[in-house]
Image (cartoon, rainbow, N blue to C red):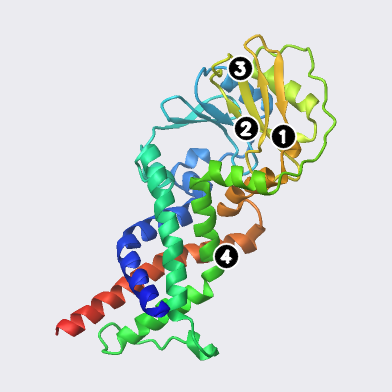
Amino acid sequence: MWKQWSARIHKWLGLTLTVWLVLVALTGTLLFYKTELLQLSYPQLNLQQVPTVAQAAAVYDRYAAGYAYLPRADKPWTEVVDGAGTIHYYDAAGELLLARPLLGDWLSWAVEFHHHLLLHELGKELQGIFGLLSLLLVVAGLVRWWPRHWSWRLLSVRWQWPSSRQFMATLWQLHRSVGVIALLPLLALLLTGTAIMYAAAVSSSLDQWLPERQTLNAQPLPQTRALNWQQRLELAASYWPDQTTRLLYLAPTEVGGYRMRLQHDAEWHPNGRSYLEFDAAGQLLSADDVRAKSRGFQLSQMIYPLHIAAVGGVAWLTALILGGLALMLLPITGVWFWWRRRAASRG
């Protein structure tokens, strides 16, 4: 009975989610190489000299809205996203290399589709729902297939050409084998991707389950005033020498403060989760060190780096790429098999 119900669930969810799975897997796999694709599409971004902090800070002072990323060796430019979503790229001399409007090229479309289905907050909610359904789809398929006796022959694929009558068997074997072999990276992508859509709920739950905190010696806030981004970045480097500034919020908050995000040496998140905030007069208002947060919160901040292969090196990146390819191949072979069998029964 379980196999019958799982077969029905797997079939109808597969038919419903096929287009979404293929497109989300395709865009996500491409985004593993976002920087390389950017440099391929825009040769002016192939820079040899990484801007210094001072050179980048001079660019940040030109903006009063949006956010900006600090230059890095793998992204050798100063990157600013203005209030309209246009991404600006500057070289070490502060010269504008490129301005990419939101949805101004195919890569921007891929990013927005993968994150929000081009539907902003509604798309984020739909992504979460589709992610949960896709996990149910995988579990139902696994229950449907689960054999009574294990053998390596269960994963064999006998190839036949589409013109052959036996091609339906090839489709079924390929669908089954890819799903089993790529199960772990496939689940890793779906679980982390869905958890990102429900980040607040996941973080709150883990915070309650693992509330233990590390006690840190709080440093007194310096009285030095930082009136521009160069001074703020210098103050951050002296206040937290073991943390690196990664992301700046160029627009003041409702209380008039400017915020920056920092990453400590052992942190997985590429943009960091520690915060410094300055008031409009340049006074350091608060210092929020992620290492003082609960173990649950810190664990929740490892989900995003795992999803984008920011950790784990080449091995983890390769596994996730295989998982992405499997997420494209599985719905295609499944729908193809369903269509061939339906056509055969009608014939």
The residue under label 3 is which amino acid type?
Gly
Distance from the alpha carbon under mark 4 to that under mark 2: 29 Å
Q: Earlier in the sequence, mark 3 or mark 1?
A: 1
Give the label, 3 or 1, closer to the camera: 3
Q: Earlier in the sequence, mark 4 or mark 1?
A: 1
Q: Which residue is identified by label 4?
A: 319
Q: Residue at x 47, y 62 (%)?
A: 324
> Front-most of 256 and 206?
206
The residue under label 1 is which amino acid type?
Thr
Q: Position of residue 185 (x, y in %)?
A: 55, 65
Q: For the residue carrying disc 1, how many other residues have a C-alpha within 10 Å: few (<14), some (14-19), or many (20+)? A: some
Secondary structure of the residue carrying numbered label 3: loop
Task: Report the side of 344 relative to 286 (left or right).
Answer: left
| Residue 118 vertical position relative to residue 309 in the rendered view, above or below | above
Give the label, 4 or 2, closer to the camera: 4
> Furthest residue to the front?
1
Distance from the alpha carbon under mark 1 to that under mark 2: 9 Å
Q: Earlier in the sequence, mark 2 or mark 3?
A: 2
| Residue 36 vertical position relative to residue 176 in the rendered view, above or below | above
Secondary structure of the residue carrying numbered label 2: loop
Q: Which residue is identified by label 2?
A: 70
Q: Residue at x 83, y 34 (%)?
A: 216
Q: Which residue is identified by label 3?
A: 257
Do tag 1 and tag 2 residues touch (Cβ < 8 Å)? yes
Q: Position of residue 347 (x, y in %)?
A: 14, 85
